[in-house]
Image: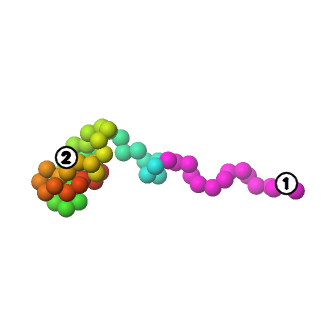
Amino acid sequence: MQGGGQGQGRGGGRGRMGGQGLGTGGYCVCPSCGARIPHQRGIPCYQRPCPKCGTKMTR
């Protein structure tokens, strides 16, 4: 017995974060005080402390 499906499977196959790479530019933003620092390639924002309050940054 053979199926008559289109063989497309499940999932979008778009990779991490929905396939929307954030690139090398942009800023790391503090979720507490709103301070912004330029994002550095190869260093995730969550590993950088805020220069004003010390909270971990987000992208």
Q: Is residue 17 magenta?
A: no
Q: Is residue 54 visible?
A: yes
Residue type, label 1: Gln
Residue 21 position in % (x across, y down):
41, 44
**Could you say where residue 4 lies in the image, as x and y percent from the top left?**
80, 55
Image quarter in which the N terminus is found: bottom right
Q: Name the residue under label 1.
A: 2
The residue range painted magenta reads 1-15
Which amino acid, mark 2? Ile
Residue projecting furthest to the right = 1
Whether residues under marks 1 and 2 lie with C-beta atoms below 8 angstroms apart, the answer is no
Near mark 2 (Cα within 10 A), the count class, few <14, some 14-19 or many ≥20, is some
Q: Can you tell which mark lies on residue 40?
A: none
Give the residue at mark 2.
37
Viewer-proximal residue, 47 or 12? 47
The structure residue drawn at horizontal position 63% and vertical position 55%, both measured from the top left corner, is 10
- Give the alpha-carbon distance from disc 1 to disc 2, as whole Å: 57 Å
Residue 10 counted in the magenta span = yes
Q: Which of 26 and 48 is in front in this view?
A: 48
**Residue shown at 56%/48% (left/top)?**
13
Identify the element where label 2 is drawn: strand
Percent position (x, y) of residue 25? 29, 40
The mark that comes first in sequence, 1 or 2, is 1
SS under mark 1: loop
Extreme residue toward the left, this view: 52
Residue 49 falls left or right of residue 23? left
In the image, residue 27 above or below residue 4: above
